[in-house]
Image (tube, rainbow, N blue to C red):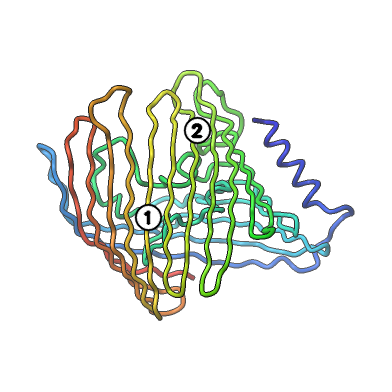
Amino acid sequence: MRRIAAFLLLFATLALGMPGAARAAEAITLSLGGHIHQYFFVAGQDEAAGENINASGMFSDTRLTFEGRTILDNGIVVRAYARIFAEANSQPNGDEVFLEVRSSLGRLRIGEKAGANTSTIGDPIPQAFLTVYDEVVGDALMPRAGVTLKDAFTFRRFTGNALGVSYQSPELLGFTVGLAYHPTPTPGDGPVTNSLVPHNAFDVSAGYQGYYPGGSYRIAAGYFHSASSDFGNDGAEAWNIAAGLTYGGWELAGAYMNVSPDGRPRETAWTIGALYGIGPWQLSADFRASKRRPFVGALFQESAERATLQTAYKLGPGISLGLAGFYAQQDDSAGVSWDGGGVLGGVKVGF
């Protein structure tokens, strides 16, 4: 897999580094941005013996972004980007920190960033208020099964924002191709022993975007593989596919991912969602499900299913209010079903 990383770096040098020394044609521009998201929920759910789950709670997501950007005299764009968690009640912590080099021949990113598959697919389904990064509905419910719906449809599930290098081609006749390599699909710097952690994770993805009168359509697919450690079953192999369609104010999209964890039974997850927007209002509905057998020959399947209805109102540029109702069912490895549901509201401000 090291050959893959070497290939990406060599390709970037040849494709993005044009002959001759380049100098900055523009002064480096600095910008500050970020967002503040505040959510409040009320939920009811099944409880195990001895549990006393609070029916209400809050979530807060505050992040700051810093960006430096310049355009060289040969047209190459160089960008440095950092996004950090800035909660008042937690230590600031880097979320994404990477360097980007972009030219007419593609885009290279090096640092802490989700891989090319996540960039190619984007949000697997449209949501009126929440996004793929806002898994607050799932966090409002106690986990009862070994499967997850968090990042269940792109390869970000395996690597998060671990250090890596990725290349994405420019669009050609509607097609784009992306490659990514993570020496270790877990946060960390420097050399590690492959006996203790999964390693050499790579993914390759391709996408197509087309247009027709009144709307557009898209399809993307990818393949992921990571090597397991010598003393654990934590490598993974997966493939996914996503598709979407827009027409007027409507959008319909869905995604499917098939995962083969090293030494464990296969997992599958799928989702579908629809959105309608008119003026400052947006309405959406989606359903997602994930399942697996906890071990070969198990009588029961572990599963998680969730349906969500959302509405959002845009107060102004970067400011929106939202409300979501949700219902979920989880089946654990013993075949016991756990139900839960509730309502979540919030405000999002981006700047």
Q: Give the quarter of the image for residue 48.
A: top left
In the figure, 319 relative to 17: above or below? below
Check disc 2 and report the residue beneath it.
Answer: 237
Residue 157 percent across, percent down from the top left: 45, 42
Q: Which of 20 and 14 is in front in this view?
A: 14
Name the side, left or right, on which 312 lies relative to 171.
left
Amino acid type at circle 1 is Ile
Lateral position of residue 236 relative to residue 178, left or right: left
For badge 2, the amino acid type reads Glu
Residue at x 58% of width, y 60% of height:
209
Mark drawn on residue 164: none
Q: SS class of the residue under badge 1?
A: strand
The crowding category of the residue bearing disc 1, from other C-alpha atoms within 10 Å (few below 14, some 14 to 19, many at least 20), is many
Q: Which of marks 1 and 2 is in front?
A: 1
Quarter of the image where the N terminus is located:
top right
State the mark number for residue 272: 1
State the residue at coordinates (61%, 33%): 190
In the image, farthest residue toward the front:
213
Q: Can you say whether 158 is above or below 288 in the image?
A: above
Q: Give SS at disc 2.
A: strand
How far from the left and from the top, in percent, is residue 138? 30, 50
Query: Observer-nearest residue: 330 or 166?
Result: 330
Q: Position of residue 328 (x, y in %)?
A: 23, 50
Mark 1 or mark 2: name the one nearer the start of the chain. Answer: 2
Q: At which x and y percent is residue 98? A: 61, 51
The residue carrying pointer 2 sits among few (fewer than 14), some (14 to 19) or many (20 or more) residues within 10 Å by Cα, namely: many
Mark 1–mark 2 Cα distance, whole angstroms, equals 23 Å
